[in-house]
Image: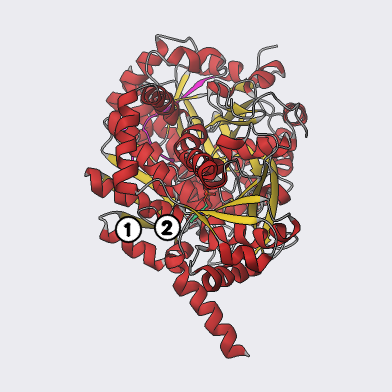
Amino acid sequence: MTTARPNSFRSGPDDRGHFGIFGGRFVAETLMPLILDLEKAYAEAKADPAFHAEMNGYLKHYVGRPSPLYFAERLTEHLGGAKIYFKREELNHTGSHKVNNVLGQIMVARRMGKKRIIAETGAGQHGVATATLCARFGLDCVVYMGAVDVERQQPNVIRMEMLGAKVVPVQSGAKTLKDAMNEALRDWVTNVHDTFYCIGTVAGPHPYPMMVRDFQSVIGSETRTQMQEAEGRLPDSLIACIGGGSNAMGLFHPFLDDPAIEIYGVEAAGHGLTQLHAASIAGGRPGVLHGNRTYLLMDEDGQIEEAHSISAGLDYPGIGPEHSWLHDVGRVNYLSATDEEALAAFQLLSRLEGIIPALEPAHAIAKVMELAPKKPRDHLMVVNLSGRGDKDVPQVGDILRGRAKAQ
Amino acid sequence: MTSRMDARFAQLKKEGRSAFVTFVMSGDPDPETSLAIVKALPQAGADIIEIGMPFTDPMADGPSIQAAGLRALKAGMTLKKTLQLVRGFRESDAVTPIVLMGYYNPIYIYGVDRFLEDAKAAGVDGLIIVDLPPEEDIELCIPALKAGLNFIRLATPTTDDKRLPAVLANTSGFVYYVSITGITGAAAADSSAVGAAVARIKRHTALPVCVGFGIRTPETARAIAANADGAVVGTALVDALRASLDTEGRATPKTVSAVADLAAALAQGVRGAQQAAE
Ligand SMILES: Cc1ncc(COP(=O)(O)O)c(C=O)c1O
């Protein structure tokens, strides 16, 4: 399915929320009036300088932006090719890029007069960011999280609870992110009068994919400026991991119309693409779920399949609709990394750079290990280090200790 | 040729009563039992039958209907087999309208044009697709109307007067008023609020208005039906079915009658409504 290459890759979505055939608003009627309200409220906020001024103040003093662009000298030497830079989103308050988007959405929710915030979370990073900003602004917060993820991301569950949020373990399906999203949508349908649904990635019904992308684009905008300062020119390639694709969209979007820049998104290949995985583009087809049309993992009857990844944050059978479109028009290259490759990258980065990454960006690092050695030494590569590994330390620790014992 | 749906509502009007609309999940707990249940429903007093198309991720359904869908999928149910079930039903019933209810993705994957053709041929009369609001009418609603199928839309308490015309524009057969903001199986709305809402919708359309979500008992069914052209019951029937299963979730000799008996009691409630209202 190839669409004509447009003049600009940055103009989407159209006014009905479509990126090519992807996107749209596939939700129950109960939610439609609210989604139209949100679209209007966001358009007004976007055009209001006071909104941006307030947001920029919090980004600087509360989130800690701009995040550094760091030259990873030891990794560069080790791989012997491209000059590798990290965009340090893991240094943000709450430990990942998720906070950029949550701040924006909470500002919009406040403008709409909403007092109750709900969210879904996989790794817990989006839940922690949401719980944090709800605490900061005195809003009620309920976070839906698959029961399996509640188990494997305990540190984040504890953090959310400390911040005053209610964490609801979801027992349906595979008890992971997809099921948490279904449950959050059910809550929203039920409490639509006072509740704002803070979606954690560039997915869901329009305007969410666009709104979340806009809030995350601060990552790419800063990178442009910082790389100019560091090297006097733009990067040659960008790379980021993809669950729903928000950290990737945030880094990529400001560069989409620079045709010379290579862009790579990395999906989770789990046990491998022919087995259990979470690579929607590599192993899926266009379908409709959670309010949008996008690439999805499903069977021949259109039933959604469970995704698998070692990383709870990438364990989702879909991907944001703008990525689906960028894939179809050929602007972004979508690759995938397995659980094992991510684990190896996790360890390499910890040892070489003194940075313990989250398992999610470890997938991006895994592909850097493949791509960087093939590039010339003057090639500038930026990896989005979307989150830090604190939440994964117990899980990875168990795996590594288990292996050491087995030997 | 008048459609089965229009003929049914014309007949109900003549009889001076509201429709009793039943919802059951196709293939729950297995394809054969499911067909037997659907066949038993008109006998029990169902005027219109909604058949759920199982989906892995039913975002607007509560635990009961969600579990029913998963039982059906586990028993190997597919969209194709749902159409076979309708064909099986049509062998013995040419008049009861059948409405398929579900989510868009399985239809999208089946292929919209092929689905509409096969559904029409199988004897389907209408579609209710929960995740296709009027904003996405070109996906399925417009092609369905062209193919001669009713496209029945949900109106909800959040659908205000400003939005109602958009919701009603391409609706046909009847309007399904969802009495609460919430998922299937949630608590019932009070009948006076529902009555007001039905009256509001009727100011915008000549179509019959049926009300669903939260109706579990003959008493509620009667109260709702007194103010609407039909009362829809789903979760209560699905719960009766589940309660009849063995510990492994398989059908027992009681399964078909468990659903049919409850349907008969609910039908009595609906039929009582007009007498009471007179
Ligand atoms: C650190 C980190 N990176 C990436 C992701 C994946 O989300 P997205 O693809 O939207 O950036 C998550 C999700 O939890 C995360 O915690």
Q: Is residue A37 left or right of residue B207?
A: left
Q: Are marks 2 and 1 on the same chain?
A: yes
Residue furthest to the front in view is A232
Q: Which chain carries label 2?
A: A
Q: Is the magenta stretch mostly helix, strand or loop?
A: loop
The location of residue A296, given as percent across then percent down, is 65, 45
User: What is the quadrant of residue B266 in the picture?
Assistant: top left
A248 magenta-colored: no
Q: Quadrant of the N terminus of chain A?
A: top right
Q: Is mark 2 on a helix, strand or loop?
A: loop
The location of residue A346, given as percent across then percent down, is 56, 68
Q: In which quarter of the image is the C terminus of chain A?
A: bottom right
| Foreground residue among A91 and B159 | A91
* Magenta-highlighted residues: B174-189
Q: In the image, what residue occupies the spot 70% across and 16% down?
A: B146
| Foreground residue among A30 and A403 | A403
Q: Is residue B56 visible?
A: yes
Residue at which label 2 appears = A124
How packed is label 1: few (under 14 Cα within 10 Å), some, or many (20 or more)? many
Q: Is mark 1 on a helix, strand or loop?
A: helix
Q: Does the residue labelled 2 lie within 8 Å of ligand 1?
A: yes
Residue at which label 1 appears = A160
Q: Tags 2 and 1 in contact by the CB under 8 Å rule?
A: yes
User: What is the quadrant of residue B219 in the picture?
Assistant: top left
Residue A373 vs B61, above or below: the answer is below
